[in-house]
Image: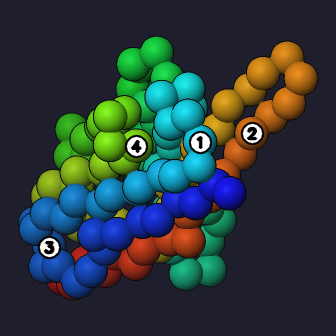
Amino acid sequence: QVQLVESGGGLVQTGGSLRLSCAASGITFSSYTVDWYRQAPGKERDLVATFTSDGSTNYVDSVRGRFTISRDNAKNTAYLQMNRLKPEDTAVYYCNLRRQTPWKTYDFWGQGTQVTVSS
């Protein structure tokens, strides 16, 4: 059974930092692309950062230079280091693991962790 457990969210002041973690079990973690998404109240869930299985990373413009996505395949864990946080970063953050094979698409979501940035 696949399980993704997120942690690290909380309340922080503008300019502060948080580090989110996404611990996976029940899968071959290194074979998956990791995405971090966020969903603010009343808005759609948006992609924030990606770390592919072959080591490439990408960020949405609004977080580039402030957020860093990383992964530790030995620990089956992905991270999102968030620095210089702004009130507009307030959202529920979700990790997603995905893998495409010729036969099947694998797609797993964590339960989400709340990040609140006060002004």
Q: CA distance from mark 4 to mark 1?
A: 9 Å
**Distance from label 2 to label 3 (Cα)?**
36 Å
- Residue type at tag 3: Thr
Q: Is residue 67 visible?
A: yes
- Residue 88 visible in this rendered orientation of the protein: no
Q: Which residue is mark 3?
A: 14
Identify the disc placed on residue 47: none
Residue 60 shown left or right of residue 101 in the figure: left
Q: Which mark is residue 76?
A: 4
Q: Which one is in front, 17 or 119?
A: 17
Between 106 and 46, the one lying in front of the other is 106
Q: Residue at x 74, y 26 (%)?
A: 100
Point out the frontmost of discs 4 and 3.
Answer: 4
Answer yes or no: do the residues labelled 4 and 1 have beta carbons within 8 Å? yes
In terms of secondary structure, where does tag 1 sit? loop
In the image, residue 12 lies at what x, y percent? 17, 79
